[in-house]
Image (cartoon, rainbow, N blue to C red):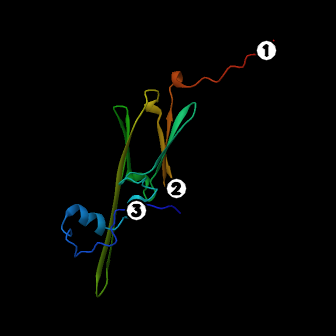
Amino acid sequence: MSLTTFKRKPWKTMFDKDFFEPNEFFDMRLPSIPFIESRFWNGKWKEPALNIIETDDEFKVELAAPGFSKKDFEVTIADGCLNISAEKKVTKEEEKMNYKRKEFSYNAFERSLMLPETVKEEEIKAKYKDGILSFDLYKKEEARKEKPKLIEIA
């Protein structure tokens, strides 16, 4: 467990003289929102966490996006940039004799990655499985690292 800092002032109340000062008001009266601070969203508003792994032949990109389906994603390449966006809307409605209940949720994000010139844009492959959207970005032949040549000692 680690200690974290926060701006809340425990001894201030709504009867203090700074009640209507906007900065003080919002700093001490709005609760922290765990969803925004979670590791999944990388501490940023609506920006999922991303892993980039480089091998000799390719880059592998993994984007954490649980709760979506393949049809929720839109992936495009424009001007050397890989653009990933997703949007999901869910509405549930229930009507009984004495009440009507309607629940809805909305989740969306956008993420863009500048591709190096060494990537073959026409051969990019994407797949979505178990909440992870992954991409294989293959390198051009001239960009691949050559394996060291073994020199025999005579």
Label 1 amino acid? Ile
Residue at 60% of width from left, 23% of height from top? Answer: 146
Relative placement, left or right, of 73 versus 145 is left
Name the quarter where the C terminus is drawn. Answer: top right
Per the image, the residue denoted by label 3 is: 35
- Disc 3 and disc 1: Cα gap in Å? 61 Å
Residue 139 percent coordinates (x, y):
51, 29
Mark 2 vs mark 1: give the one in front: 1
Residue at 45% of width from left, 50% of height from top? Answer: 49
- Disc 3 and disc 2: Cα gap in Å? 20 Å
Q: Earlier in the sequence, mark 3 or mark 1?
A: 3
Mark 3 vs mark 2: give the one in front: 3
Residue at 47% of width from left, 33% of height from top? Answer: 123
Per the image, the residue denoted by label 2 is: 130
Mark 2 and mark 1 residues within 8 Å of each other at the beta carbon: no
From the viewer's perspective, is residue 57 above or below residue 135? above
- Disc 2 and disc 1: Cα gap in Å? 51 Å
From the viewer's perspective, is residue 57 above or below residue 43? above
Tell which residue pokes out farthest to the bottom in this image. 98
From the viewer's perspective, is residue 71 above or below residue 30? above
Residue at 48% of width from left, 62% of height from top? Answer: 3
Quick one: SS at disc 1?
loop
The quarter holding residue 96 reads bottom left
Quick one: SS at disc 2?
loop
